[in-house]
Image: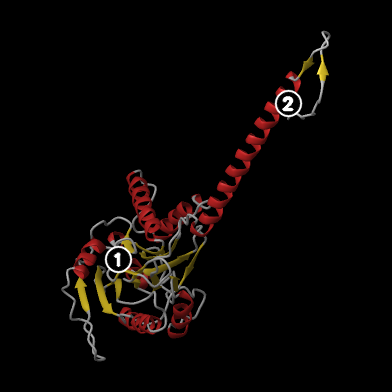
Amino acid sequence: MPYIWLPVRSITNHHGKRSGKRSGNCNYNCNSSINSNAVFFLVSIIILSCVQLSAGAQFEPYTLNGGLVSAVAGRNFCIAASDTRMIGEGGYVLESRNHLSNRLWSVDDDTLMADVEELLRSGSDSAETTTTTVVREIEIDLEDTSSVSQAPIFIASSGCSTDCCQLQRTIRADFRAASYFGQISRSSPDQVANMLSQTLYERRGFPYYAFCVVSGLDIQGTNDGSSNGDSNSDSDSDNYCCGKAYVYDAIGSYESVAVAAAGTGRELLQPILDRMFEARSGCDNRLVDGTANEAVQTLCKAYRSVSEREIGVGDKLVLHISEMNADGKVSRRVLVVPLKQH
């Protein structure tokens, strides 16, 4: 409780002498209180000034690094695609033209897309973009797998690059652990999609700033148009597979679709793909009509259209195509298509 100074002009003791001792104590207490209040007032002003100065430079844990990813599911093929442009803060800072390692990746292959990115960075494709309408494309044929169960499942993620990198490490570690204990199969995109959903949902309080699509071949598909009682269709059913595509939000909610798109420019790409791809008629509309080559051409046209209108999309388009051949083997190839360079 602060002291209250009461001025006393004259105080006499029992000897009749004047005493000023009480007045001196009151002056000392009053000066101490004034000094304390002044110091507190100055410190408050300094703290408020610092808060106001730092209000415009608050810590922001997320940065949008761009990336437009997509996936297409067909009768006997699946495609995962992404552009390679990486933008910085504000959307107008170009960080990289060949960013791919944590944007398009396999759940169990650490080297495939890393090798493709090294090829892009090496400058071997520097002449692929010309001023004319004729463009060169790079096609990389990968080793055919013996069966659908050996075909890789791809995840494409866009958003904050650091979160995509951390998500990549987490998914690969969880997938290897679950595969070791027999809890997940490489040939089941449904299980990988569920695992990714659970991983994203676990971080719902402070979510990964990553928007993902999943693409893979599923050997559990049934051949539409063939009756179960027809013995002649047994061999065809054994070799039949279908593509799967899933699209996610940042907290793990996902959906199985025929054509999936996520990331920067999704609002432009999704309606184009919906218009250019025709869904299969019948009970299952999660597969697109046409061949893998037709789907590749459609994706290239759509990405080129978006790159003309969205500054965060451009440079190169990388597509990974997995397609089942007539002999039951799965052929894989990576296609690099140049886009507009702003």
Q: Quadrant of residue 10?
A: top right
Q: Quadrant of residue 327?
A: bottom left
Q: CA distance from mark 2 to mark 1?
A: 76 Å
* Residue at which label 2 appears: 26
Q: Is residue 179 left or right of residue 287?
A: left
Contact, mark 2 vs mark 1 (Cβ under 8 Å): no
How far across and how far down the image is residue 342, in percent?
A: 33, 80
How far across and how far down the image is residue 3, in percent?
A: 74, 28
Residue drawn at x 24%, y 61% is 114
Q: At label 2, which amino acid type do we have?
A: Cys
In-front residue for pair 300/235: 300
**Mark 1 crowdedness (10 Å alpha carbons): few <14, some 14-19, many ≥20:** many
Task: Classify mark 1: helix, strand or loop.
Answer: loop
In-front residue for pair 288/303: 303
Q: Is residue 2 left or right of residue 64?
A: right
Marking on residue 100: 1
How far across and how far down the image is residue 275, in percent?
A: 47, 85
Task: Classify mark 2: helix, strand or loop.
Answer: helix
Badge nearest the viewer, 2 or 1? 2
| Nearest to N terminus: mark 2 or mark 1 | 2
Is residue 339 depicted above or below 205 in this figure? below
Q: Is residue 50 left or right of residue 263?
A: right
Residue drawn at x 56%, y 52% is 49
Residue drawn at x 76%, y 29% is 5
* Residue 322 appears in view: no
